[in-house]
Amino acid sequence: MSDNHLPRDLTLYLLARFALVGVIGGGLVLANVPLLVALLIGLLVGLPLGMLLFRSLNARVTAGLARRNEKRARARADLRSQLRGDRADGTA
């Protein structure tokens, strides 16, 4: 899986989490719970429930973020090495 899937996976994960909060909140509103209270309960219940229901999507997002952070750390180390004046092969 390449890094260009990270924005898509992250967007899907966020939309799924918002949809879950909306479904929970909407169900509570239909049960005559005030809107603000329903949204707060939807957020509180949707947080752990979304982590369980969307586990595979969460894993893909986490893996994509880890790959991106790894690349950034390598690029930062290369830049620091160049600024110190080290040669390209890593020797002084």
Image (cartoon, rainbow, N blue to C red):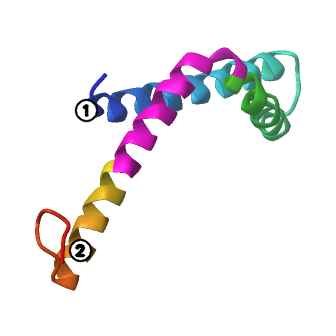
The N terminus: image quadrant: top left
Q: Position of residue 46 (x, y in %)?
A: 74, 28
Nearest the camera: 21 or 59? 59
Quadrant of the image occupied by residue 34: top right
* Image position, residue 90 (x, y; %): 20, 66
Residue at far bottom of view = 84
Looking at numbered disc 2 in the image, what kind of residue is underneath it? Answer: Ser
Magenta region, residue range: 52-70
- Whether residue 68 is in magenta: the answer is yes
Closer to the camera: disc 2 or disc 1? Answer: 2
Q: Within the magenta stretch, is there residue 83?
A: no
Question: Image quarter for residue 33?
Answer: top right
Query: What amino acid does circle 1 point to?
Result: Asn
Quick one: SS at disc 1?
Answer: helix
Q: Nearer the viewer, residue 50 or 35?
A: 50
Q: Which residue is mark 2?
A: 81
Q: Main secondary structure of the magenta part?
A: helix
Give the residue displayed 30% in from the left and 66% down from the top: 77
Residue 30 in picture, x, y percent from top left: 80, 16
The residue shown at (35%, 45%) is 68
Measured in 3D between alpha carbons, the distance from the residue under mark 2 to the one under mark 1, in whole angstroms, is 28 Å
Question: Which residue carries the number 1 mark?
Answer: 4
Left or right side of 30 for 77: left
What's the residue at 51%, 35% (across, down)?
Answer: 62
What number of labels is visible?
Answer: 2
Q: With 90 as the anchor, is 34 left or right in this view?
A: right
